[in-house]
Amino acid sequence: MNKLKNEIINTTCSWLSLGIPCITPIKDTVEAIHSIYDQVLFDKLAYVLSNQESDFDDWLKISEKFDEDNKAYNKMVKQLIYYINAMNETDLLFAFSNLLRAYKCGLICKNDFFRLGFCLTKLLAEDAQYLSNNISKGSIEENIYCISLSNNGLMYNRSRGFSDSESDAEKEFYSFTQMGKMLDKYALNFGNEERYNYKEVDNIIIQGVAEHVLKKL
């Protein structure tokens, strides 16, 4: 456990030195980060990394062709830092951790990972929970959650003022977009096998997510 903790600290410090050059002197310990801002960012990064497999950094280096082009790896790390730093709620950080795991599993492509990750940076945890609780519904009458989610491309107005009855003539109805469904499957509820089916080859990884969720309960 201590070895894993040290690896997380070392990787977090390494990422921070890439994303924020002015704090390059950070080496091995949390105590080396002096400002509150840096401490909060460090905690966020450490939280996300603690929810990945121990070989995550090595995998990222390989996937970004670290040996052939360090710029690709550096760019990816910086983008991850920007996304993580933009999230200020633990539930969303947990969802982003899940999204990273889904990307590592090969369940989503890099472009979709970035799109869904960007959505998480714009969401409130309350809106994300609403999406999770209502994702199976085909049509929902307009409310504040629908408007917020539609602004982030996760729902769309399916009625545009049209309806099947006069009584509903003034009502607007919303449905979830494909991106909204993907966000639930690969981020908000990743590993929930009662709701979704995943590739068999990923069962071990997904089980790890499920076990982590159970620990939180």
Image (cartoon, rainbow, N blue to C red):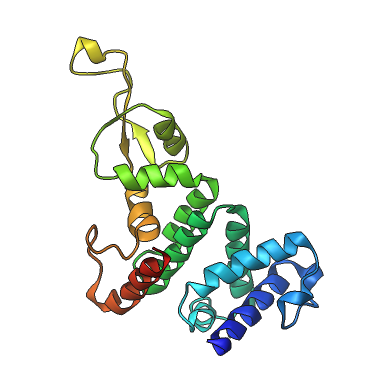
Residue 136 drawn above or below residue 35: above
- Left or right: 2 with respect to 206? right
- Where, quadrant-wise, is the C terminus in this rendering? bottom left
Q: Position of residue 117 (x, y in %)?
A: 49, 56
Outermost residue to the left? 164
Outermost residue to the front? 217
Q: Residue at x 24, y 60 (%)?
A: 196
Outermost residue to the top? 166
Residue 70 drawn above or below residue 82: below
- Left or right: 95 with respect to 25? left
- Left or right: 31 with respect to 191? right
Give the quarter of the image for residue 200: bottom left
Q: Position of residue 17 (x, y in %)?
A: 72, 73
Residue 203 drawn above or below residue 78: below
Give the quarter of the image for residue 44: bottom right
Q: Residue at x 23, y 57 (%)?
A: 195
- Left or right: 111 with respect to 71? left
Q: Position of residue 89 (x, y in %)?
A: 55, 53
Residue 22 drawn above or below residue 26: above
In-front residue for pair 121/189: 189
Q: Position of residue 163 (x, y in %)?
A: 23, 18
Total label count?
Answer: 0
Q: Residue at x 58, y 82 (%)?
A: 5
